Image (spheres, rainbow, N blue to C red):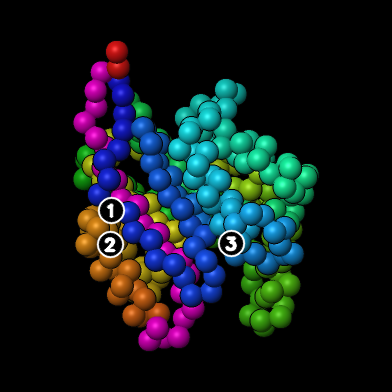
């Protein structure tokens, strides 16, 4: 059988502090959202408006091409294949540099005969309503969970140290240029989906700030383009009111298209 997605909403608002470093898309059975991490280490000067934007654009392009890793299956194969392609593209631009290489949170969803499989690295959020009426929230974890300092200078020091230690044993794994990051993704198989929304953490601020009560209301408020635009507009008004620097905010809402028999 052939599986694919139908789009319900795709909305992106650029943040206040930098160029757009989110990306999202879908092709065939696969859908994805990417949230580039704000640079804290010395930039490499990759050919885009920022290093994280370059990574988000490259991942978006390679995920659309779905270069699967033959040693893995499901979302792990798609994610590892895209990261391997990024690694190859990075060699002439950045050599073997890894620590200063840009990184991103990412979630990849893949339709299959059982329903939808979701693989996540870091803190993009996926909310799925399955055909039994249940609502599921999928997120790998908080990207800065190890950073506890309140003092701005000490917090920046901890954030930089945390970035330097990413994609090493016992630390946070993110989408960077290591295909083996796919082996550390949080992977969950769910039943047949009715509706799915993928959100960057900048869009999920609508939940953090109490504009919506949780996953079920977030899904309801992002079910159409008009609804998603309205929610993000409300979010920006709230952030302006409280003086919060707004992050990039991306929402991609999809439903499975009717399945067809493969020839």
The structure residue drawn at horizontal position 22% and vertical position 62%, both measured from the top left corner, is 226
- The magenta-colored residue range is 240-261
Which residue appears farthest toward the front when viewing the image?
A: 47
| Mark 2 lies on residue | 228
- Using a 10 Å C-alpha cutoff, classify the residue at mark 2 as few (fewer than 14 neighbours), some (14 to 19) or many (20 or more): many
Q: Quick one: SS at disc 1?
A: strand
- Residue 170: tell me if it is visible: no
Name which of mark 1 and mark 2 comes first in the sequence.
1
| Residue 131, image x, y percentages | 22, 39
Q: Which mark is residue 152?
A: none
Q: Which residue is mark 1?
A: 9
Query: Does residue 143 appear to the left or right of 22 in the view shown?
Result: right
> Dots 3 and 1: beta carbons under 8 Å?
no
| Residue contact at pointers 3 and 2, CB within 8 angstroms | no
Q: Position of residue 53 (x, y in %)?
A: 56, 57
The residue located at (26%, 37%) in the rendering is: 256
Instruction: Please give the residue where the numbered disc 3 appears in the rendered image.
Output: 49
Q: Residues within 10 Å of mark 3 (few under 14, many from 20)?
A: few
Q: Quadrant of the N terminus?
A: top left
- Dot 2 falls on a residue whose secondary structure is helix
Disc 1 to disc 2: CB gap under 8 Å = yes
Callout in the foreground (3, 2):
3
Asked whether 249 falls inside the magenta stretch, the response is: yes
Q: Is residue 63 left or right of residue 258?
A: right
């Amino acid at each position: 059988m052939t599986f694919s997605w139908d789009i319900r909403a795709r909305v992106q608002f650029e943040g206040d502090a930098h160029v757009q470093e989110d990306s999202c898309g879908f092709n065939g059975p696969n859908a994805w959202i990417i949230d580039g991490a704000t640079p804290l280490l010395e930039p490499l000067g990759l050919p885009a408006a920022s290093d994280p934007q370059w990574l988000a654009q490259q991942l978006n392009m390679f995920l659309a091409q779905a270069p699967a890793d033959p040693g893995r299956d499901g979302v792990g194969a798609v994610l590892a294949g895209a990261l391997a392609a990024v690694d190859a593209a990075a060699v002439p631009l950045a050599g073997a540099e890894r620590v200063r290489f840009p990184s991103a949170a990412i979630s990849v969803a893949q339709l299959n005969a059982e329903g939808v499989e979701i693989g996540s690295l870091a803190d993009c959020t996926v909310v799925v309503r399955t055909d039994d009426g249940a609502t599921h929230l999928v997120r790998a974890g908080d990207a800065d969970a190890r950073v506890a300092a309140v003092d701005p200078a000490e917090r920046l020091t901890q954030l930089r140290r945390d970035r330097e230690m990413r994609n090493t044993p016992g630390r946070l794994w993110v989408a960077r240029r290591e295909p083996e990051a796919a082996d550390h993704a949080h992977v969950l198989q769910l039943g047949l989906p009715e509706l799915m929304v993928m959100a960057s953490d900048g869009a999920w601020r609508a939940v953090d700030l109490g504009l919506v009560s949780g996953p079920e209301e977030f899904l309801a408020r992002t079910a159409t383009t008009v609804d998603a635009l309205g929610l993000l507009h409300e979010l920006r008004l709230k952030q302006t009111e409280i003086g919060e620097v707004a992050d990039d905010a991306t929402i991609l809402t999809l439903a499975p298209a009717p399945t067809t028999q493969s020839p």
